[in-house]
Amino acid sequence: TYSGKQFYLNIPFCRSPYHAYCCFFYLGHSFSGKNQGKYRSGISYCRAGIFFCIGAGMFFGSILYRKKKKENCTYSVQTQCIDLRKKSDSDGDLYSPVYQYYYNGREYIYKSKVSSNAKPPELYGYYEIKINPENPEDIWFPNRAVVGPIVGIMLMVVSILIAFSLLK
């Protein structure tokens, strides 16, 4: 886990609105080499280009991943949230749900690899998921928020704005 200070120094994947804010703060703060000479400005263009590429990768990667899941996971099943694994760190409590579902008379357990401080699913609540009939452990949550493309677009836009601000 990362504290806010570690986050904007290391720039890992944005996992909360706070981290996204720190990411954009880092972009604006470290790339503003406007009055620091030609060399610093060149480094800032390179950094802006790198972050633009990261944003484009997040945008297109998320879109392609969602498209692949939509094509492969075609069978609807009801799943139940049977546990909420709780982790505490400097950002507060993070929840990682565990789901149970049945397909062809067999029970499957899915432990989410993602922890979030957003509103967790209701414990023992039922949710619709899509599974791959050929590989029932391959699941997709069609109603889950699409964050990757949004963060990708934001990274690209901020990178472009920073690059244009360096032209002056």
Image (cartoon, grey):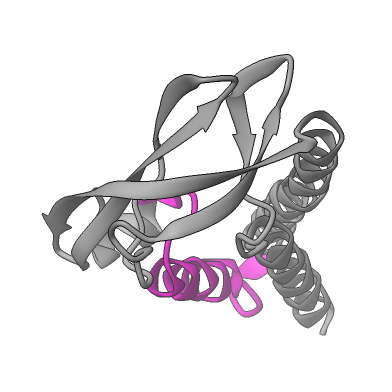
- The location of residue 137, given as percent across then percent down, is 56, 22
Q: Quadrant of residue 35?
A: bottom right
Q: Which residues are magenta?
A: 10-37
| Residue 43, position as x, y percentages in the image | 65, 53
Snapshot quadrant of residue 160:
bottom right
Residue 101 on image: x %, y %: 47, 35
The percent position of residue 67, horizontal first and vertical second, equals 85, 42
**Secondary structure mostly taken by the magenta-highlighted segment of the chain:** helix
Q: Say if 71 sits above or below 4 in the image.
A: above
The residue closer to the viewer here, 4 or 110, is: 110
Q: Does 82 sit left or right of 164 as displayed?
A: left
Residue at the spot 36% in from the left edge and 55% down from the top edge: 9
Residue 110 sits above or below residue 144 on the image: above
Residue 97 in the magenta stretch? The answer is: no
Which quadrant holds residue 73?
top right
Q: Nearer the viewer, residue 167 or 151?
A: 151
Q: Is residue 34 magenta?
A: yes
As displayed, is residue 30 above or below residue 94?
A: below
Q: Residue furthest front?
A: 105
Q: Residue at x 69, y 54 (%)?
A: 142
Judge left or right: residue 80 versus residue 49.
left
Q: Of residues 65 and 124, which is closer to you in this image? A: 124
Disc tally is 0
Instruction: Report the residue at 27% width, 56% height from top.
Output: 95
**The C terminus: image quadrant:** bottom right
